Image: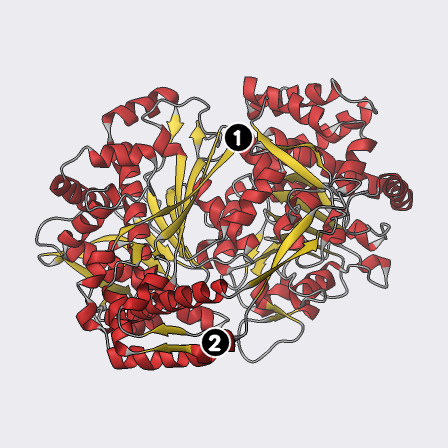
Amino acid sequence: MALVKRSGHAKLKAALVLRDALLAELGLMQLAAMQQLRNVEENIGAEPGLAEGKYLDALLSVCKGSSDHLITLDGNVRAACLKAGLSPRYAQYLALVLFAHWVTAQQDDPAAFLIRLNEYLTQHQPKDADFVIQPFSEADLQLAAFWMATAAGKTHVLHACLALLEKLRPWNSILIITPSESLTRQHAEKLRALAAWDVFAYPMDGDASALGRLPPDTVIVLDINKLAVEKKGDGLTVPTHVFKDGCNLVFVDEGHKGLKTEDSTWKALQADLAGIDATETAHRGLLIEFSATFGQVAEGEHAFGRYAKAVIFDYAYDRFHQDRYGKDFWHLRLQGKEDTSAILQQQTLTAALLAFWHQRITFASSEAREAVSYAGLQVAAPLWVLLGLSVIGGSSAKKDVEQTSDVVDVLRFLHITLTRPNELRNSLDQLLGTAGILLDILPGEVRAIASALPREALVKRVLTDVFGWHAGDKAVFRIIRSASGELGLGLLRGDSCHYFGVVNVGDASGLKKKMEENGLAVEEDAMSSSLFAALDAAGSKVNVLIGSRRFAEGWDNYRASSLTLLRLGQGEGSLIIQMFGRVVRFAGVKGDGKRMESPPKAIVPLQTAYIYGLKSGYLDTFLQGLSDNGVSKLTRTMGKIKPLDPFPPLLQTVIAETPQARDFSVSAMGGGWLKAANPIRISLAASVASSQLKAGDVSHLKDEVGSDLTEDFKKRLALIDVDALYRHLVDFRRQQAHWWNFRFDRAGIAAALHSDRYVIFGLPGVLAIARKDDIDRINRMAGTIVRRLFESAYRKQESRHCRYQRKAAAPLNLEYDYYKEIAHGE
C-alpha cells in the first residue's frame, strides 16, 4: 500500500509515452543521455558544447541507434539554435533533438510514424496509472508540448522550434499566443532582437485589418484574450475566421491555461487555429505548447492522456533544482484560529521584512561583494515581493473582497511601520523573544544577526536599509497616472518623494477607494513614470513589490528574492509553481543560471529564497511533488504488521453504556461546582510549518508557538458583557441533546472566569484592546472558557453514572505496512 497519494506531477511524469517512444527510436536511454550531456555542459560550457560538437559526441557515446540520423538531427538543431541566438543548456539541447526527430518522422512518413507510436504504446502502457492512454491518432501528431520549469528557457526553446519548423511546409500564418499583453510585448521584443523574422505584435503594431495583409512568414504575436469565434463590439477582439481554412503554425506560451473544462473555449480556439483534426488534410497545421505546470493541471482537468501523448520533453522543477538551477528556498507558514489572524499577519509580515532586510544588508556588504566578484556570480539587488491571486476586479466577488482586504492590511502594516517605529520595535521584541514569547519563525542566520543588534539600532537599520527612511519622513501612497494599475509607495522628504515600493494591480482606483475606507490617504502623481517597468533599471530604489497574478507569468526579472504569499489556496497548483518560479530565478555564474554548490557564507542569503505563507496552505502540494520526484528523503517499506491468527477466543473488551439524563443531574451554581470540572487549556497559539530545500533535500518542521496569557485575560474581565454571555450559554445548553438536567447561574459563570481551572496559551497581541472588535474577541474567549468548563463538569458526572459490560473482541482482518524515512545514501 502507498504511504501517500501520488501527485498529478508524478503520475504524468510516469506516463510520458511520446517522450519515451522518441528516445527509444533514437536508441537513447534518458538518464544516460542526460548524464553525458550534463557532463559536457559542466566541464566546457553550453556554447562550445554545441559549436564544437561535444553535445553530439556525448549522445553518440550512449546511442544504440543510427549515428547518421543523430548527426543529421544535430545539424538541424545547430542551425535552428544559430538563428534563434541560443547556446542551449544540455536539457534544452536534448529537448530540441527529440523535437527535431518528431518533425522529421512526420515529414518522412507520418502513417508509418503513427504505427510505430501505437506499437510502442501497446508494449509500454503505464501499468500503475489511474487512466488508460488511448491509441495515438492523426490529430495527436499535430500537438507537441514542452514541460519545462520557469526560468528553464522555454522562450528560447520556442524560438528554436520556430526555426526548425518554418520551412517544414508553406504556412498560411505563424502565430504565438500568449496569456497577456505584457508577455506579447516580451516575445515580440526578443524576436525583434534576433532580427531573423518579421514580427507583428497585436494590437501594438496595428489594428485587426492589418492581419490579413501580412506576408505568411510574418510571426504574429497576440494574447489569447484577443481571440474569439466572432468579433464582439468595437473592441480589440480578433475573430478566428481571419486565420481559418489555412495551414497554420501555432505556438502557445503558458499552454496549461484553458483546461478548466474538457471543451474549454480557449483550447477549442487554439485547436481550431491549428486545424487539429481538420476535415481537409491541407488545413491541418501544428500546435506547440509550452508550460512549467502541465503536471499540476493534468489530473484535475482530466488531461493526462492529452499530455502523455504530447510532451516531447520534461524538465520540471525537480530536475531543474537537482541540476542546481535557481535558488534554494526556506519556507514557513503560520496557521492560527480566526481570533489570532491579525496577530499572525503582523508576525508573518515582520518576520518576512526582517528576512528581506538580511538579504539587503548582505547584498550591500563588502564581504559579499568581494565573494560575488571572485566567484563571477551575477546577483541582482534583492526585491521583496508580496503576491495574491487577484486584487480588485477579479472573477470572484468573494476572492475580490478577500484579496483587497489582504493588500490593504499589508499597506496598513507598512504605513504603521514607517510612521510609528515603536510599533516595529514591539513586533521585533515579540519576534526575537524579549517579550515573553519566542516565535521561531526566522531562518537561523537571520535570527543570529538581528539578535546581536541593540533593538533601537535594529529598528533604524531595517527602516533605512529596506525603505530608505530618514527621521521626519512622511509615508505617502500615490496613484501613478502614467502607468495603468500602479500605486507608488513613498516617503515624502520636504517637497520630494522617494519611492521605495509599488503596488501593481488591475484597478488602482478601486484599490484607492478601499484604502480610503480604511483610513489610508491616497494622492496622485502626474509626473512620475512607471515604477514597475523600471525595477530592473540600474540604481532602482524600489525594494517592495505588491500585486496580483498580473506578473505571475512572463515577468523576466532576477531581483525577486523574498516572497510573501497572500491567500493562495490548495487548488491553485499552476499559479503556485509560476509564482514560486519568480523568486527562485537566479542569474548564476556568468549567467549560467546555477547557484553555487558550496558557496561562501556571505553568499548563502543571496542564493536562498525566503518564502512566507500568509493565510495559505499553498505549498504542501508542491513539496509533495518534489518528494514524489526525488528531491527529498526517501520512504522505505520496512515490513508488515498482521493481526493475531487464530484470534484468542477468550480476549474480551469493555464497553461503556451512557446513562440516561434522568439518572443524574449537574449543577454549575455558585463556585463549588468547579471542583467537579477538569482543568482546560485554551489555545490561541499559531501552528508553524516550515520547509527548507538544500542540497536536494526537503526538510520539514512543525511546531506551535505562544505564551501563557491567563493573567492578562483576567485583567480584562471587566470588559465582559455578563448578560450577553448568560444568554449565549442558555442557547448553548438548549442546543445540547438531553442537557435538561444541567443548571447554572450568573454566579457560576463569574466563578468560572475568576477560577484557576483554565489556562490561555496564545500570542500576546490577541488580548490587545484597540477597537470594538478586540472587546468582542475578549467576550468570545470568555464564552469559550465557560462552555468548555461546563462540558468538563457535565462529562465528568456523566462518566460516574456509566455502566460497563464485557464483550468478546472481534478479530480485525487487516494488514498494516509500516515505514521509515531515510536520508539519501543510507
Element at label 1: loop
Instruction: Assign the C terminus to one quadrant of the image.
Output: top right
| Left/right of residue 327 with respect to residue 770 in the rendered view | right
Residue at 85% over, 43% down: 121
Closer-to-camera residue (42/234):
42
Estimate how packed mark 2 is, as few (under 14), some (14 to 19) or many (20 or more) residues with alpha carbons within 10 Å.
Answer: few
Looking at the image, is mark 1 or mark 2 earlier in the sequence? 1
Instruction: Assign the N terminus to one quadrant of the image.
Output: top right
Residue 627 drawn above or below residue 824: below
Element at label 2: loop
User: Label 1 sits on what residue type?
Assistant: Gly
Residue 60 drawn above or below residue 138: above
Q: Which residue is mark 2?
A: 736
Closer-to-camera residue (168/266):
266
| Left/right of residue 644 with respect to residue 147 in the rendered view | right
Foreground disc of the pair 1, 2: 2
Q: Is residue 215 visible?
A: no
| Left/right of residue 25 with respect to residue 759 in the rendered view | right
Q: Which residue is mark 1?
A: 696
Q: Residue 589 location in percent, x, y?
A: 43, 26
Q: Residue 283 location in percent, x, y?
A: 80, 60
Q: Is residue 140 visible?
A: yes
Residue at 37% over, 50% down: 385
| Left/right of residue 681 with respect to residue 661 in the rendered view | left
User: Label 2 sits on what residue type?
Assistant: Gln
Residue at 69% over, 27% down: 31
Q: Residue 758 location in percent, x, y?
A: 31, 58
Kindly report the distance in space between the C-alpha atoms of the residues bearing marks 1 and 2: 53 Å
